Amino acid sequence: MRLAFVTGSLVHGGAERQAITLANRLAERGHDCHLIYVKNDPSQLGRLHLPASSTVRCLHAKRYFDLGALSHLHALLERLDPQVLLAINAHALMYASLANAGAPLMVTLHSTYLRTLKEQLQMAAYRPLFWRSASTVFVCERQKRHWLSRGVFGRRNDVIYNGVDLEHWQPPEGEISASPLRRALGFAPSDYVIGLSAVLRPEKNPAQLIEAVARLRAMGLPARALFIGDGPERARVEARARALGVADRFVISGFQEDVRPFLSACDVVTLTSFTEAFSLAAVEAMALGRAVVHADVGGAAEMIHSGHDGWLFPVADTATLVDRLARLADPVARTRIGENARATVAARFSERSMVARYEQVLAELATSRSKRAQLRNRATAH
């Protein structure tokens, strides 16, 4: 199949990372893949490994809706003539839908909740574009139910869970406390290191982990935090740590091309987000054999069976978060849950299964286009 991907950018983020992974893997399976991104943020461009014959192009949009960028995209799609066009999230859908030269359009939606009035108004404008899509792909059942009840759907609606490469995300060998990176970050073997892997944006609620560390230390546990990433909430995290007297109890790593060594240096991993669809960061940590304590948002309950392969806690409920983390201070408990977490990912959230499911839906869309073209040709002939 000849496929064209359209993303809003290649900024650090789970949706962009999954789009790149999907393009890479489908190209490896022999499909002709091309990728176009709207805004010039190529932060993850180095992850893209398409053949030299593939088109990889930035539209250099200077504003949210840029007519010049739209015209550029239309010309590219006319030349590429994809059998299926894939848009990643609603902003890319707007460009792909308006520039589309007739290919079936699949849109993947990686968000759930709208935080501002501006976002609500934008979604109202996007809704008819979803209705025109040949397929809308949601990343979990809960997210699908949420959006269908709000009138966001395509002509067909599929759920495809995010997946990870189990060979790439292998649990490390040896004792976590002996990790050279852990020592380099200033953690002692006896420290109880709690990781959070995310861009530090408001919806990720990273300061809640600082609150939890302060409470755990008050209970006598040697808790420390490792924030794997960076972002606009960094200053708030640092200020809250100073206010609670734990400014020396956390480390912010900054953005990392490869987060595996940093996740492997953690005893457990948490996600304190106010909103998620289906967290790729959580699946990655689980694949590494880490116990994950996840706010009960989005598809978290479809990913984690609380007490078996991780723990859930109510959104913004720091007391329950602390209770869950305190239970996992026991090395035996967190090892057992980590092993179960790895088994869950292998059974349900492998990259191979994800790519195969996308390939199946894309093939069905491409076939439907071919059939429509054949019918048009027959009608013209008569």
Image (cartoon, rainbow, N blue to C red):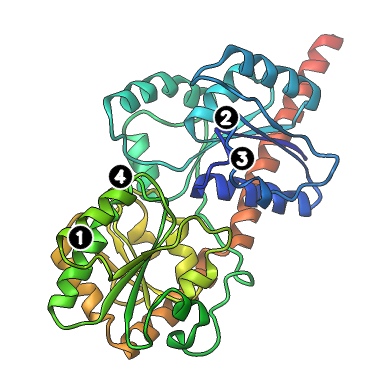
| Looking at the image, residue 83 lies above or below residue 98 | below
Q: Which class describes the residues within 10 Å of circle 2: few (<14), some (14-19), or many (20+)? A: many
Residue position marked by numbered label 2 in the rendering: 39
Residue 101 % position (x, y)? 70, 18
Q: Quadrant of the C terminus?
A: top right
Q: Are marks 4 and 1 in contact (CB under 8 Å)?
A: no
Q: Amino acid at mark 1?
A: Arg
Q: Are marks 3 and 1 in contact (CB under 8 Å)?
A: no
Q: Amino acid at mark 3?
A: Pro
Q: Which residue is mark 3?
A: 42
Q: CA distance from mark 3 to mark 1?
A: 34 Å
Residue 373 location (% of width, % of height)? 77, 22
Q: Amino acid at mark 2?
A: Lys
Q: Are marks 3 and 4 in contact (CB under 8 Å)?
A: no
Query: What is the C-alpha distance between the residues marked 3 and 4?
Result: 22 Å
Q: Which circle, 4 or 1, is nearer the viewer? A: 1
Residue designated by label 4: 202
| Disc marking residue 242 | 1
Whether residue 73 sits left or right of residue 379 in the image: it is: left
Note whether 286 is above or below 179 in the view shown: above
